[in-house]
Amino acid sequence: MNKASALTLIEVMVAVGIIAVMASTVIVNVSRSRSRARNEKRK
């Protein structure tokens, strides 16, 4: 494998960290929306 095209461990870890933060934000927002919708349906 060409060294110039290889990703370092740090780069991969940073990318995974960014994806994890984005995924957790989406999960929290979806959870809040579902909870809000459930509360509105009860009224």
Image (spheres, rainbow, N blue to C red):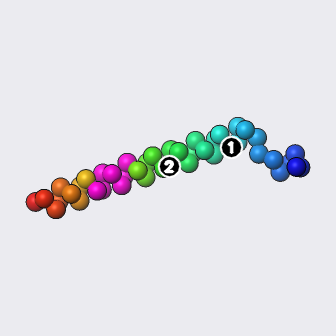
The residue that appears at 48% across and 50% down in the rendered structure is 23
Q: Position of residue 7 (x, y in %)?
A: 77, 45
Q: Are marks 1 and 2 in contact (CB under 8 Å)?
A: no
Q: Residues within 10 Å of mark 2 (few under 14, many from 20)?
A: few
The residue that appears at 30% across and 51% down in the rendered structure is 32
Q: Residues within 10 Å of mark 1 (few under 14, many from 20)?
A: few
The single residue placed furthest to the front in the displayed view is 1
The single residue placed furthest to the bottom in the displayed view is 41
Q: Circle 1 sits in a helix, a strand or a loop, which is it?
A: helix
The residue that appears at 45% across and 46% down in the rendered structure is 24
For the residue marked with disc 1, what is the amino acid?
Val
| Mark with earlier residue (1, 2) | 1
Above/below status of 23 relative to 37? above
Please say whether residue 3 is one of the residues in the magenta stretch.
no
The residue that appears at 57% across and 45% down in the rendered structure is 18
Q: Position of residue 3 (x, y in %)?
A: 87, 45
Q: Position of residue 13 (x, y in %)?
A: 65, 40
Q: Circle 2 sits in a helix, a strand or a loop, which is it?
A: helix
The single residue placed furthest to the right in the displayed view is 2
User: What's drawn in magenta, residue-wise?
Assistant: 28-34
Please say whether residue 31 is one of the residues in the magenta stretch.
yes
Instruction: Please identify the quarter of the rendering in which residue 36 is found.
Output: bottom left
Q: Which residue is mark 2?
A: 22
Q: Is residue 42 left or right of residue 30?
A: left
Tally the numbered discs. Answer: 2
Instruction: Tell me the tag on residue 27.
Output: none
For the residue marked with disc 2, what is the amino acid?
Met
Q: Which residue is mark 1?
A: 12
